[in-house]
Image (tube, rainbow, N blue to C red):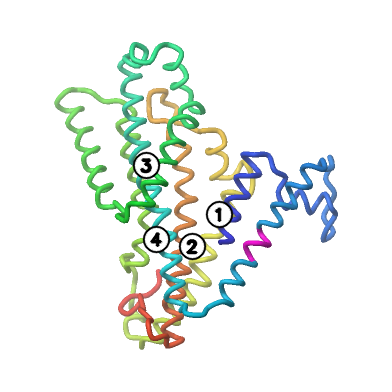
Amino acid sequence: MVALAFTLNNYLIFWQGWPGLTSLVSHLGWFGAEPLRAPLASSAVTLGFLQLASYALTILIVIGLTLRRAGRTMTTDADLLISIAAYIARAAFWAVLLVGLTDMVISFLRVEGVLVSLLGESLSTQLGRAIYRGTYIHYPLIGVSLVIAWFSRSLGFTWLALLIVLAEFQIVLARYIFSYEQAFMGDLVRFWYAALFLFASAYTLIEEGHVRVDILYAGMAERKKAWTNVLGSLFLGVPLCWIILVSGMWDKSNLINAPLLSFEVTQSGYGLYVKYLMAGFLLVYALTMLMAFLGYLLRNAAVLNRDPDARPIGASHGAP
């Protein structure tokens, strides 16, 4: 939940112009922070306190849920975290599917000169601008994906893999039979290929599908395996996810924020306008893997606690 609060505040700071906790702390001179060159306006201070309250409320909710464990086990909490990660992954899958297909159609119509006759000169020109296409085409499709993912329980990674194969096949077919090739065709494959690997990572972790070396782990007793999984998740997996989040979103020039803020696209004017979304893939990866690692940790902690419903994921494999 803290990671979700961090992501929300990142959006408020860099997209909506809220001050953020660091600016608020500097403005108030807390903890010996160096004062800002230009003090915050009173309205900005109010927004800063709202952001501070969001973190405090998140921590209180986590503490409250931890203390009120009547009828709940660690396995139940693990399943909740994993279900949230699965929802984010499902929404991301539908988003890349809808955005990829829609953007491919727009790019095809543009490169063939048909878009102007269909939509007019003005709208055709606007669709050639990344900020317009992202705001009025991509973002609404992402919203639709969130709704579809709420009702759909299939992760769809198998279908995405099939679509990648079909996209590659149509490139080969068009190039060697019809001598036709455009930048958007290769962009679509890269877009879906990146999504497949990054979005499916959390699901693969939970299902014990990652490749690993089990020289020492394979011979351990069940409780030693559980300890290995707990410590590996706590000291390796969770910190890795936070490193991605913080290093990618701490400033507007960082790896995740910069492309999203500028609607970065490839240099090919007739390719897909989705390069900025591929930076967002790292955010989806970090959030889903963080929740998966925490769920993995709790499930193995349930084994150590000898919970009656404990389902050790690592019965035959170790944490990655």
The question of residue 56 being in magenta is answered with yes
Residue labelled with disc 1: 245
Query: In which image quadrant can residue 303 be found?
Result: bottom left
Residue labelled with disc 3: 96
- What's the distance in space between the residues labelled 3 and 1, CA to CA? 21 Å
Quarter in which the C terminus is drawn: bottom left
- What's the distance in space between the residues labelled 2 and 1, CA to CA? 10 Å
Span highlighted in magenta in the image: 55-59
**Image point (44%, 36%), residue name:** 140
Q: Residue 89, how many percent across, how many down?
A: 39, 53
Pointers 2 and 1 in contact (C-beta within 8 Å): yes
Could you tell me the amino acid type at mark 3?
A: Val
Query: Callout 1: helix, strand or loop?
Result: helix
Residue labelled with disc 2: 290
Asked whether, in this view, residue 223 is left or right of residue 172, the answer is right
Q: Residue 13, how many percent across, how many down?
A: 66, 44
- What's the distance in space between the residues labelled 1 and 4, CA to CA? 16 Å
